[in-house]
Image (tube, rainbow, N blue to C red):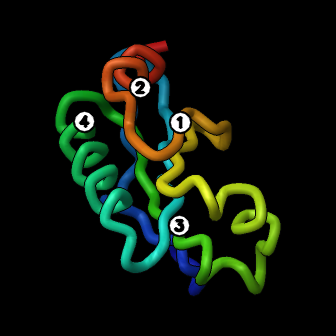
Amino acid sequence: MTDDRASRSEGDEAVTDPQGREHLVTLLTRAGCGACEGAKAELLALREEEPFRFEIVDVDEEASSRPGLRAEFGDRLPVVLVDGREHGYWEVDVERLRRDLRK
């Protein structure tokens, strides 16, 4: 994202697979979350294999503009969203995510 909210994109271009599909994977996180750092590393590694746009959103920093985000997901971090829908939490199911990104 290019605005001044707590979201940040990893990579500055949209990524499209050969069939023309483009997915957005969002990692919900917070500062000091070791599991969140591990999930980020897994997602970045997967991005080397599967094309997708990737953003990281700190739920605490977003709380002032999107309080429902922290209320809904704050106790389950890290949370992975695919195209805005919850895909998993606490850990990344890499195999399932890989399959879902190919759909």
Circles 4 and 2: CB distance less than 8 Å?
Answer: yes
What crowding class fits label 2: few (fewer than 14 Cα within 10 Å), some (14-19), or many (20 or more)? Answer: some
In primary-sequence order, the first of circles 2 and 3 is 3
Question: Badge 2 is on which residue?
Answer: 97
Circles 2 and 1: CB distance less than 8 Å?
Answer: yes
Q: Residue at x 67, y 56 (%)?
A: 73
Element type where label 3 sits in the image:
strand
Left or right: residue 66 versus residue 31 is right
Left or right: residue 58 versus residue 47 is right
In primary-sequence order, the first of circles 2 and 1 is 1
Name the residue type under label 1: Gly
Q: CA distance from mark 2 to mark 3?
A: 19 Å
Q: Is residue 21 above or below residue 16?
A: above
Name the residue type under label 2: Leu
Question: Badge 4 is on which residue?
Answer: 46
Pick the front one: 58 or 22: 58
Q: Is residue 63 above or below residue 74?
A: below
Question: Badge 1 is on which residue?
Answer: 88
Element type where label 4 sits in the image:
helix
Q: CA distance from mark 3 to mark 4?
A: 18 Å
Name the residue type under label 4: Leu
What crowding class fits label 1: few (fewer than 14 Cα within 10 Å), some (14-19), or many (20 or more)? Answer: some
Q: CA distance from mark 4 to mark 1?
A: 15 Å
Question: Badge 3 is on which residue?
Answer: 57
Q: Is residue 17 above or below residue 72?
A: above
What crowding class fits label 3: few (fewer than 14 Cα within 10 Å), some (14-19), or many (20 or more)? Answer: many
Circles 3 and 4: CB distance less than 8 Å?
Answer: no
